[in-house]
């Protein structure tokens, strides 16, 4: 098993402390601000936390995760959404299926960064959003060696067909906006 993969219980994924730390509403606001996004794929959806918040804003959502238990849990919150068991490196959707894709603190866990970003570009029509831990040592989140430097994410985005890169620093996290 990949040591970088988050594998906690469902309650912890939706705890009040985690919701605050992830700045869920602020992240969703940033992703939807001034955009024409009507559909989004939540990659590494977990229990569907971000998918649920996007759905509450009228966005059509779908989600993928490698953990079948998480997919079953996500379906409890969004029974009408399309959730599939899949990796970020091999998305089971047609080209340009979504206006955007979203990674909620999951990019640092993938096995192949380039293949992941290439797939994100392939299935998104407009943008990709990557929410990640800031690159610094903290008493929460993954260790520093599992965190991604902003320069690395920007390089990956350019190498995989995204034209514009924007970094938005949040209290505990950073949100990258990649535009095609």
Image: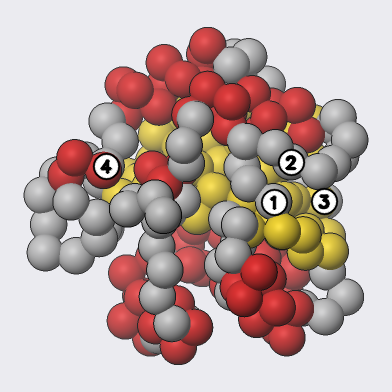
Front residue (pair 65, 82): 65
Label 2: how many Cα within 10 Å (few below 14, some 14–19, many 20+): many
Q: Secondary structure at mark 2?
A: loop
The answer to whether the residue labelled 1 contacts the one labelled 2, judged by CB atoms less than 8 Å apart, is: yes
Q: Secondary structure at mark 4?
A: loop
Residue wearing tag 2: 91
Q: Percent from the top left, x then y, of residue 164?
A: 55, 19
Front residue (pair 102, 65): 65
Label 4 vs 2, first from the N-terminus: 2
- In the image, taking residue 169 as reference, residue 87 lies left or right, namely right
Q: Which mark is residue 86?
A: 1
Cα–Cα span, label 2 and label 3: 19 Å
Residue wearing tag 4: 147
- In the image, taking residue 107 as reference, residue 102 lies left or right, namely right
Q: Percent from the top left, x then y, of residue 160?
A: 59, 16
Cα–Cα span, label 4 and label 2: 23 Å
């Amino acid at each position: 098993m990949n040591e970088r993969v988050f594998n906690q219980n469902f309650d912890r994924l939706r705890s009040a402390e985690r919701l605050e730390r992830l700045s869920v509403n602020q992240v969703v606001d940033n992703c939807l601000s001034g955009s024409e996004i009507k559909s989004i794929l939540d990659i590494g959806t977990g229990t569907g936390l971000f998918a649920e918040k996007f759905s509450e804003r009228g966005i059509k959502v779908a989600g993928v995760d490698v953990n079948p238990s998480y997919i079953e849990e996500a379906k409890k919150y969004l029974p009408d959404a399309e959730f599939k068991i899949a990796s970020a490196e091999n998305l089971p959707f047609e080209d340009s299926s979504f206006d955007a894709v979203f990674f909620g603190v999951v990019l640092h866990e993938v096995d192949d960064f380039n293949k992941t970003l290439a797939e994100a570009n392939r299935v998104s029509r407009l943008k990709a959003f990557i929410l990640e831990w800031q690159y610094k040592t903290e008493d929460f989140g993954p260790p520093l060696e599992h965190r991604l430097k902003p320069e690395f994410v920007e390089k990956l985005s350019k190498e995989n067909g995204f034209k514009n890169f924007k970094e938005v620093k949040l209290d505990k996290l950073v949100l990258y906006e990649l535009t095609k």
